[in-house]
Amino acid sequence: MSQERIFTITDKAAERIRMLLERREPPAVGIRLTTKVAGCSGFMYDIDYVDAPAPEDVAVTDKGVTLYIDRASLAYLKGTVMDWREDKFETGFVFDNPNATALCGCGESFMVEEKAG
């Protein structure tokens, strides 16, 4: 499976990640994206710098930047598109996640319903 199908980073998000990495002291090798149980819908995105990849990380390189996603979060993030948005009301990374079955009203958290098997 190609990395773009696992996770996609838009041009704007890649530009922002590059800028964040260039400004960081000490330098980081990339950005880690995980999901954590939180928020009113169940899961929240968590972003942090990566100084050294963890054994459970899956490296996704897109548009010249590397994102590390832990294997536990990968099932919730597969197929997601990460973008950077700046407007009058908010600034930050936004996620178009095809796995999310519901979002909270403020857009900070999401729900993933388990499929009956």
Image (cartoon, helix red, strand yellow):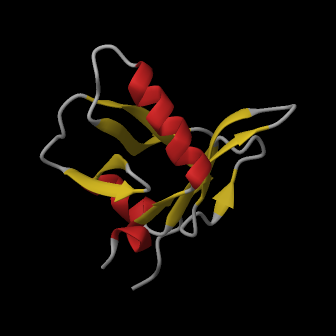
Q: Quadrant of the N terminus?
A: bottom left
Report x, y in % for residue 100: 59, 63
Asked if 70 appears above or below 49 in the picture, the reply is below
Identity of the residue furthest to the right in this view? 88
Residue positioned 45% across, 82% down in the render: 116
Q: Is residue 100 left or right of residue 31?
A: right
Residue positioned 29% across, 28% down in the render: 28
Residue 41 visible in the current orientation: no
Asked if 30 appears above or below 114 in the picture, the reply is above
Q: How many marks?
A: 0
Residue positioned 38% across, 19% down in the render: 24
Report x, y in % for residue 61: 34, 56
Report x, y in % for residue 106: 76, 40
Identity of the residue furthest to the bottom in this view? 117
Asked if 51 appears above or below 56 in the picture, the reply is above
Report x, y in % for residue 109: 61, 45
Q: Quadrant of the C terminus?
A: bottom left
Identity of the residue furthest to the top in this view? 25
Nearest to the observer: residue 61 or residue 34: 61
Residue 102 visible in the current orientation: yes
Residue positioned 68% across, 54% down in the render: 103
Nearest to the observer: residue 111 or residue 54: 54
Query: Quadrant location of residue 50?
Result: top left
Query: Quadrant location of residue 72?
Result: bottom left
